[in-house]
Image (cartoon, rainbow, N blue to C red):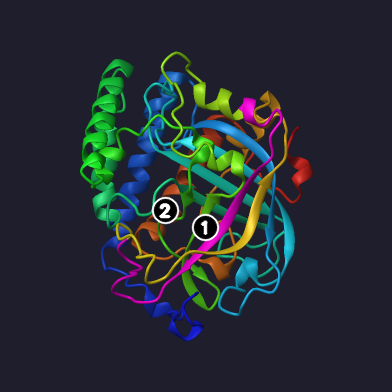
Amino acid sequence: MTTPAASYYPYSDPVETVENNEEQTFDEIAATMRRIAQTIGDRARHAARPVHAKSHGLLNAQLSVADNLPEHLSQGLFSKAAIYPAIMRFSTNPGDMLPDSISTPRGLAVKVIGVEGQMLPGHQGNVTQDFVFVNGKAFPVPDAAAFLKQLQFLEQHVTDSQTLKQIVSTTARLAEQVLEAVGTESAALMGFGHPETHILGETFSSVAPLRYGKYVAKIEFEPSSDNLKSLTHKKLDHSSDYSAIRDAVVKFFETETAVWDVRVQLMTDPLRTPVEDASVQWPEDLSPYVTVGKLAALPQPAYSPERRVFVDEILSFSPWHGLEAHRPLGNIMRARKKAYMIASQFRHSMNSRPSVEPKSIDELPA
């Protein structure tokens, strides 16, 4: 049973509380991310994303919107039954290309193509809606100021040896296992180490809220097909292969079709389901996730050289690429707008690559 529509908190501008000095923090975040990208790029003689630099699967997919959704779910991109082509990019968190034995949190960016409607400022004239997700239910820190401190810490250690990063990752994973055994988790530890599981078994979430037409929501992609569910929490040996995660994704899509549920959790209470504090996991007993569509990928070459160049070098993903009906909300999301834009401009400039926002899925190489 779902919560009655009248219980869902309506979207209006006042759902956000803009702090007086937050633009200065956003500028510092953007500058820090650019310095991280510049440092790594200078060492590699090639610029990459300052976060989620290493991709592991690049897929041609389809997002289908369910038919006959109730009014409170029939919003924005999901306002009517439709099928959209999409590009999926699986990644891991760091800005440098670390061996997969250094197991870190995972990300999934999805670019939906052929979208119509009023676009966000700076995205006018495009037909894409991006979803930039991580495998968590909440952000590790509550706001941009705390995130800046994390970034500054990472900047201090960006040139640390891979051996040291391996030690930190392993230690964090072991500590996390101890915490999980007694029923608790540490988002801070999970930022340094992640269980060595199969990336295709993960559930990916927006973590921070988005506008959902007349309402406010978090959105997630959860494994739906049995073959994905069987990979949830499944250990993947990362120790001997620099690209173990990519190789596992490529092998899977040689023969398998994958399906994820597209699920929405609507805001109900400004205190218990807050917009500005991204570290709060919204209680699912208060507002359960509800399926509004499917995301599916058929068997395919999941990591061709041509596809890697197009997705990793030419495309960019940002929660600010999309519809006004899905405006990113909250302090963390507002910080990402400038940071992602400056990082993309730096990467494309340094690599002398065009920045392309596709009009058709046919632009994605096979």
Image quadrant containing the C terminus: top right
Residue 271 shown in magenta = yes
Q: Is residue 229 above or below residue 126?
A: above
Of the numbered discs in the image, which one, if any, rests on residue 336? 2
The spot of residue 167 in percent (x, y) is 26, 21
In the rendered image, which residue does mark 1 sit on?
A: 320
* Element on which disc 1 rests: loop
* Element on which disc 2 rests: helix
Decide which of tag 1 and tag 2 comes sooner along the chain: 1
Asked if residue 319 lies left or right of residue 51, the reply is: right
Residue type at tag 1:
Trp
Q: What stretch is highlighted in magenta?
A: 250-277
Residue type at tag 2:
Arg
Are discs 1 and 2 less than 8 Å apart at CB? yes
Taking depth in this image into account, of 46 and 5 the one nearest to the observer is 5
Quadrant location of residue 281?
bottom left
Taking depth in this image into account, of 237 and 149 the one nearest to the observer is 237
Taking depth in this image into account, of 308 and 68 the one nearest to the observer is 68
Q: Is residue 266 above or below residue 135?
A: below
